[in-house]
Each structure stands twice: as C-alpha cells, then as structure tokens.
C-alpha cells in the first residue's frame, strides 16, 4: 500500500505557523461540554399523534445519559402555531399542548438532572408569532402607539404607501415586509419579518421589549434550566434608517455572508460589510443585559449564540466575558472536507475564541442544515438552507457520506472546547432526500414555491427500534414527516452493542473524550503526516484524520479509537484515529 507519511516543503508551508494553540480555561461545565440537540417534534412521541413531545423525551433520556453527553438543548417547545416548527412563539412562558404541559417540562428537567444531564432551552427573541398577544395588540392599536413600537412597523413608500419600505428579502424567500389591514379594512403600515410573515420582528431598541425578556428568562431560570441557546442572536438590531441591501451571494442560509468563497479563503470576510439586519454592534448591549440576569443564578448558566456572522473574530465578540458563554461555530460546520481548510478553521476558531477567554464550539449538524452524513459527500458545495431532495443533481453517495461523517465526528470530538451533536447523527442518519412534496412543512418550501426544498430532510422522526411501528418513535406508527422505508438498520436497537456501529463509535468517543479530558485540552499540531491530514496531539492522545486518497503510516501506540477498521498499521482515506502517545 502506498504511504504518504513524508512531509514536503509545500505541506509544511501550508501548516499553521504556531504549533501549539492554547485553549482558554475556566471552571464552567459548558466549556468542554458535549451538548445534544433534541428537536422535540421528532425525538419521541408518547401520545402517538405523530409529533414528538416532552413525556416522550423524558422516557428516552436514559439513552442519552448512556450515550455519554453532558447536556441537552431542546429546540422550542413553547406555545406556538407551529408555522416554523415552534420558532414562532405565541407564549414564551407556557408549553404548547402539542408537546405537553409545564408539569411535563418540570418532570423532564428533574429526570435530566437526576441523570446528570444539564438542560438548555431555546429562546427566540428576534421575533414572536403573529398570534402573540403583543402582536395582536399592535395590529389593533393605531399607528405610532406604544403597542406598534414593540415591533418594526413602517409606512410604505409612494403616494398610496403600497411600496415596501425597503428591498430586503426574507431568509425563507420573498419580501421581508408584510402590509397589514387596519381594523377599519383599509391597507395599513408594513411590518418587518426576517423569516416568515408569521414571525414579526420585535423592536429591540424599545426598553419595554428588553424588560419583558428579562422576565421570560427568569421564568425559566427559576424553574431550573441551565441556560439558553439564543435564536438569531445576530439579527435583533437593524441599521438605523433600514437602508436597501442586496446580499452578495446565494447560500447565506440563516445569516451573514457565510459562503463557499469565504470558507475557502477566496474572499476575505472582513471585506464584506454586514447586512443592515445582521451583526449590528447594538446587539452586544442586549447580551450584556442577559449576562447580568444569568449571573443572578447559581450554577454557571450558559448562553449560546446562534450568530451567523463572519469572520470568526467577529463571532468571538458575542462571547466576550460580559456577554454570552458560547457561539455556534458555523465556519467549522461548513468547512470543506479537505485538510487545509479544516486545519485553518480549527486554528482560527481556537485562536479567535481564546482571545476573548471563551472556548471554541464545534458542530457538524443541526435542524437547519443537510445532515453531515449526506452533506460531506455532496459533490458541489453544501446547499445549506436550500436543502436537497428528490430532484437534486449529484445525490450524495450514502456509503461515502457515512464514512466521512464518522471520521468528521471522531475528529470533532477530539478537539478542545464544546461540541454540539444533533439527534440521530449518533445513528449515522442521512438526510431524507425522498420526502414527497406534499409532506413538506418548512416555510422555505412554500415561500420559494418549491424552488428550495428547505430543512425537512434533516427533521424526520428518528428510529429507536427496527421492528416497531414508526421505528419506535411512538406506538401508533404515525409520523408528522414520513420516515423512509429503509431506516431499520439505523435504529438504535439495531446498533446497540454491535461493534463498529455508528452508535458504538459515538459512545466510545464520548467515553474516551471524557477519560482523556480532551474537551479541556490544548492542541499541538503534528507536521509529520503530510499535507492531506489533520493531525494534532491533545494531552496524551494523538489524533489523525486522513483526507487524502492514499493511506498514511501510523505512529506506534495504542489505538484508542478508529472511525474505520485499521489494517496493517496504515490509516485509510476518510478515517480518523486516536492513538495514546
Ligand atoms: C434559526 C432557527 O435555527 C431556525 O430553525 C428558525 O427557522 C429561524 N432561526 C427563525 O427562528
């Protein structure tokens, strides 16, 4: 077998100059935590109506404790008309009947804490549902009233006011403005909605809004939640005057200019101005206020920002010591499956976050993107928010995708900092690419008239038991999104105790990560394995991922973990190994 273990000058030149990168330290649990995202609609359904719920989650929590994660993050379960799967909240202090009751939530929390799992709720402050009483009051109140000032109402342009206040386009497609009808039946003002028209943006310049959210945070902190993931944390303040803006490129997904050119270093992200609705400096004041509220509570409560901004040094501004604790690392999520960009994003992440005393986070999948067991085998750049479906050209090869996903996760879980997992990735689930059009529910699909598939393919209820109706998601066999016919091999019970299964790989990786304290370690680059690898030492563990086509000779040592079988002392392509050194 050809070996590729000889470094060449090109390789060395491409590798980062500094060979050790020190991670910021601190005693808080979240600095090194592995946090498992539960998408409540699709995790476990106790009442058999086809939509997952809180009692279903509680029932299945032991499986997550056994997996070895430290915390769960629950996507929204608050009262909501479910126009955007719960990211359209109509009451922040109650549970939607679809998911259960406040009592069910308390039981979930108690069970999780009893199992040693922290619980993070998903706060959605950028917008409410149009059914929220604040918005209904705003519609009923006259122009210029305090009720209207809680949202982003503006007069239309032109003599009849029928031209939108500016040219902004919604993240889900179509315009970012909707015109209202006044109580007397005449056309009225327009309101801004970065997402669906059922999700009007709040006016965060208004102190009343800020105060209300302090109360909402305290409501959940008093109940005992360990922190919040904060939705659209980069979008809450808009540039004064709301100037026209046209995005530079397609594919910006949930936010700023995260695009392939940026990721591959072709475009310097510093040169791209922030859109007038993302990453405005005024947001930081809001986070300082939230930080103060969390600091009133014991136990290192966490705030994690969903902030789609570039570059990483700008994301790091969200996690300065008096702001949030962590921010999702979307640059890492979308790094190409190539050694050089991966090394680069790892280096830049740790450096950028360490510079402000924060840990880096790492993430490969969530409920908004194509699952990484499919995305990593796409031949073109990831379509991100556009999704993939039956008519997508160049469908990813599932075998290659899973192999790369296992290697990618094994690499990620060895990195110092905090890692996020998305439900089902521990089973190796691919994106469901065959969902029929009439089953789709994502507003992206509707607002683009079916031009973009959206995110349903990563949201299909997960399989627990191979031979049960709906693979054990519930007992009735109903499922709000149809499950593929061929998911039995992915079911948890089909993988439990099976050597080499993806579930067992995750369990081993999580146990070893904790045993060797990889989450709190530092990273020393290893330059001896050629340019097609990512290789580093974290504490007493050497980690090598081979992204090249030829096998790489391994150093002597005990193999602790390998994402694929190792034969003859050489690391095959698309494989990660952990070696005790
Ligand atoms: C980001 C969430 O992750 C996504 O699912 C949601 O649609 C938007 N924010 C709007 O809340």
Image (cartoon, helix red, strand yellow):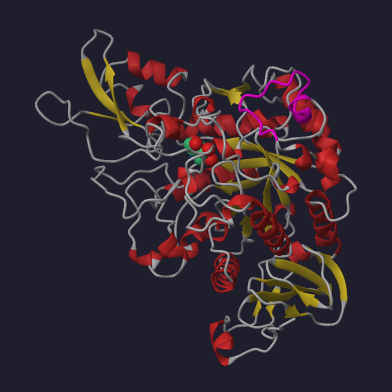
Q: Which residue is outermost to the top?
A: 184
**Is residue 522 visible in the rendered structure shown here?**
yes
The quarter of the picture where residue 241 lies is top left
Front residue of 310 and 202: 310
Front residue of 438 and 147: 438
Magenta extent = 469-485
Q: Which residue is outermost to the left?
A: 159
Q: Quadrant of the C terminus?
A: bottom right
- Does 513 sit left or right of 223 as displayed? right
**Residue 276 screen position, x and y as percent:** 32, 48
In the displayed structure, 283 sits above or below 89; it is below
Give the residue at x 51% y 40%: 389
Give the residue at x 26% y 48%: 245
- Does 260 sit left or right of 35 as displayed? left
In the displayed structure, 370 sits above or below 416; it is above
**Is residue 106 visible in the rendered structure shown here?**
no
Front residue of 467 and 409: 467
**Residue 309 screen position, x and y as percent:** 45, 55
Does residue 41 belong to the magenta stretch? no
Give the residue at x 56% y 33%: 435
**Residue 291 screen position, x and y as percent:** 58, 46
């Amino acid at each position: 077998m050809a070996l590729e273990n000889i470094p060449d000058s090109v390789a060395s030149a491409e590798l980062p100059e500094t060979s050790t990168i020190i991670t910021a330290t601190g005693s808080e649990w979240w600095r090194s935590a592995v946090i498992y995202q539960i998408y409540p609609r699709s995790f476990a359904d106790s009442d058999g109506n086809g939509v997952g719920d809180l009692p279903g989650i509680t029932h299945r929590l032991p499986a997550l404790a056994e997996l070895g994660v430290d915390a769960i993050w629950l996507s929204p379960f608050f009262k909501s008309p479910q126009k955007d799967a719960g990211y359209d909240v109509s009451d922040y202090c109650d549970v939607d009947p679809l998911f259960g009751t406040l009592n069910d939530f308390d039981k979930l929390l108690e069970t999780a804490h009893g199992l040693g799992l922290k619980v993070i709720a998903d706060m959605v402050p950028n917008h409410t549902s149009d059914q929220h009483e604040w918005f209904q009051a705003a519609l009923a109140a006259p122009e210029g009233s305090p009720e209207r000032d809680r949202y982003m109402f503006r007069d239309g342009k032109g003599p009849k006011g029928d031209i939108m206040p500016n040219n902004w386009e919604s993240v889900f497609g179509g315009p970012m403005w909707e015109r209202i009808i006044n109580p007397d039946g005449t056309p009225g003002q327009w309101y801004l909605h970065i997402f669906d028209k059922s999700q009007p943006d709040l006016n965060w310049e208004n102190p009343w809004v800020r105060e209300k959210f302090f109360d909402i945070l305290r409501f959940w902190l008093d109940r005992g939640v360990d922190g919040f993931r904060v939705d659209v944390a980069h979008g809450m303040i808009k540039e004064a005057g709301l100037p026209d803006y046209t995005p530079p490129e397609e594919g910006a997904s949930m936010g700023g200019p995260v695009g392939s050119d940026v990721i591959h270093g072709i475009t310097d992200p510093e040169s791209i101005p922030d859109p007038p609705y993302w990453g405005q400096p005024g947001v930081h004041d809001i986070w300082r206020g939230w930080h103060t509220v969390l600091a009133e509570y014991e136990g290192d409560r966490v705030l994690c920002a969903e902030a789609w901004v570039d570059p990483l040094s700008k994301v790091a501004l969200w996690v300065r010591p008096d702001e949030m604790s962590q921010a999702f690392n979307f640059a890492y999520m979308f790094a190409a499956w190539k050694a050089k960009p991966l090394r680069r994003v790892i280096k830049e992440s740790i450096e950028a976050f360490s510079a402000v005393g924060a840990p880096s986070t790492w993430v490969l999948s969530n409920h908004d993107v194509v699952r990484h067991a499919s995305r990593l085998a796409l031949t073109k750049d990831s379509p991100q928010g556009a999704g993939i479906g039956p008519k997508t050209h160049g469908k990813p090869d599932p075998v290659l995708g899973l192999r790369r996903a296992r290697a990618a996760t094994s690499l990620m879980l060895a990195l110092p900092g905090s890692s996020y997992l998305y439900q089902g990735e521990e089973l190796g689930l691919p994106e469901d690419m065959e969902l029929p059009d009439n089953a789709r529910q994502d507003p992206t699909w509707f607002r683009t008239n079916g031009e973009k598939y959206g995110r349903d393919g990563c949201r299909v209820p997960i399989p627990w038991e191979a031979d049960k109706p709906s693979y054990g998601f519930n007992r009735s066999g109903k499922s709000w999104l149809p499950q593929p016919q061929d998911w039995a091999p992915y079911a948890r019970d089909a993988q439990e105790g099976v050597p080499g299964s993806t579930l067992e790989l995750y369990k081993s990786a999580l146990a070893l990560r904790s045993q060797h304290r990889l989450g709190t370690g530092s990273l020393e680059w290893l330059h001896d394995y050629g340019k097609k690898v990512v290789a580093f030492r974290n504490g007493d563990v050497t980690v090598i991922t081979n992204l090249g086509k030829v096998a790489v000779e391994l150093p002597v040592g005990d193999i602790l973990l390998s994402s694929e079988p190792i034969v003859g002392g050489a690391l095959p392509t698309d494989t990660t190994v952990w070696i005790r050194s």
